[in-house]
Image (tube, rainbow, N blue to C red):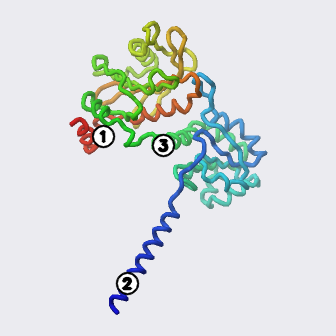
Amino acid sequence: MKISTLKKHTLKFTFIILLLTLLSACNVQKEAVGKEDLIYVVADSSEFYNLEADLLSVFGKVIYTPQAENLFNLKRVSVAKLYKYKRKKNILIIAPLNSGSYTSKYINSILDSSVKSMVEADSDFVFNKHNLWAKDQLVMILTSPDLQKLKTNILKNSENLLYQFQTISDKRLSEHLYKANYEKKKVEAKLLKEYGWIIYVQADFVLALDKPDDNFVWLRRSPNSDMERWIFIHWIDNASPTFLKPDSIYKERNKITKKYYQTSDGKAYVQIADSYLTSKEVNFKDKYAIMTQGLWRTSDHEMGGPFVNYTFYDTVTKRIYMLDGSIFAPKYFKKQLIQQVDVMLHSFQTRKEMTKDKIKDLLDELK
């Protein structure tokens, strides 16, 4: 009798565990899907017509690689069909709060009274929901008391709005790129041991050049192909933060690439092209940095492509670090390729920024 009761309890317990496991599995979010550079704009057609130019000026900003490519493309969908797009990576829901449109009514239904009061007072107009309907998804809600206020707020906050979608896009890409199984840990360990810093090295990158006399390391993917990616790390010892000026950065980069980025016959070298060159102050992993974007070309004007560069001063090592990524892919659009090298540059860490366990695990690779 006792054995029979025990079996019943065991079966009951097993059933509960199985039920909880199934319920837990049902609650696991699926990955967001869709193109990385496509934002689905949920809006009524007439309101979208009035807002489209403003939205394109923010999210459809053109970059030159040297082809003209939009950072993001926009696709309007009706709120009535939102259910079809709930797993998309980038969703923007937009309408004036009091317009009475279908999208306006939907926004009113999902915002609580305190939030609506903030919108009415024009103290806030952007509300982000991460992982709302899918993993690594951003749903952004933009609303203001009326259409004109909404247009004004969009333009006034353009950089922040774009930054939100760029950040989540970089996060998704980094999770896709950074895989331990496809990581050259021995190369990373060598860089850490010899120079006191690391950068994530994908399996298909090679250590093309290592020049300690010039404090220069070149990582290269797919050499001599029609889709190359180049990353170099250059540093200046005993430096001063006064170096952080665009002219100094351009001069230093040109000096380095003239020496090490040469054509196979040695007759031409890489230099910064004059067109589409921009520099701006940015926060690079909690460090003040100058971000430079533009085009490179060979001195004979036969080849070219886009590059991105972060230059900053490290107070611990008293070094100026220059992290640089370039693309050579003449047959392809290059926006996503330059984003990939940008994400890889953000994996850079000095020894001081690493945990003791990570340092030990890497250095063990050299034993």
Q: Residue furthest bottom?
A: 1
Residue 311, image x, y percentages:
41, 26
Quadrant of the rendering where the C terminus is positioned: top left
The residue that appears at 48% across and 43% down in the rendered structure is 171
Residue 189, image x, y percentages:
28, 34
The quadrant holding residue 156 is top right
Residue 183, image x, y percentages:
37, 38
Circle on res. 38: none
Q: Nearer the viewer, residue 41 or 38?
A: 38
* SS category of the residue bearing label 2: helix
Q: Which residue is mark 1?
A: 354
* SS category of the residue bearing label 1: loop
Q: How many marks?
A: 3
Q: Choose mark 2 or mark 1, whichever is in front.
A: 2
* SS category of the residue bearing label 3: helix
> Eyeballing the image, is 266 above or below 170?
above
Q: Residue furthest right?
A: 46
**Three-letter code for the amino acid on which mark 1 is drawn:** Met
Counting residues from the start of the chain, the first of labels 1 and 3 encountered is 3
The residue that appears at 45% across and 68% down in the rendered structure is 21
Residue 165, image x, y percentages:
56, 42
Q: Which residue is mark 3?
A: 171
Quadrant of the rendering where the N terminus is positioned: bottom left
Distance between mark 3 and mark 2 Cα atoms:
49 Å
Q: Nearer the viewer, residue 321 or 88?
A: 88
**Three-letter code for the amino acid on which mark 3 is drawn:** Lys
Counting residues from the start of the chain, the first of labels 3 and 2 encountered is 2
The residue that appears at 60% across and 52% down in the rendered structure is 87
Q: Which residue is mark 2?
A: 7
Q: Choose mark 3 or mark 2, whichever is in front.
A: 2
The quadrant holding residue 233 is top left
Counting residues from the start of the chain, the first of labels 2 and 1 encountered is 2
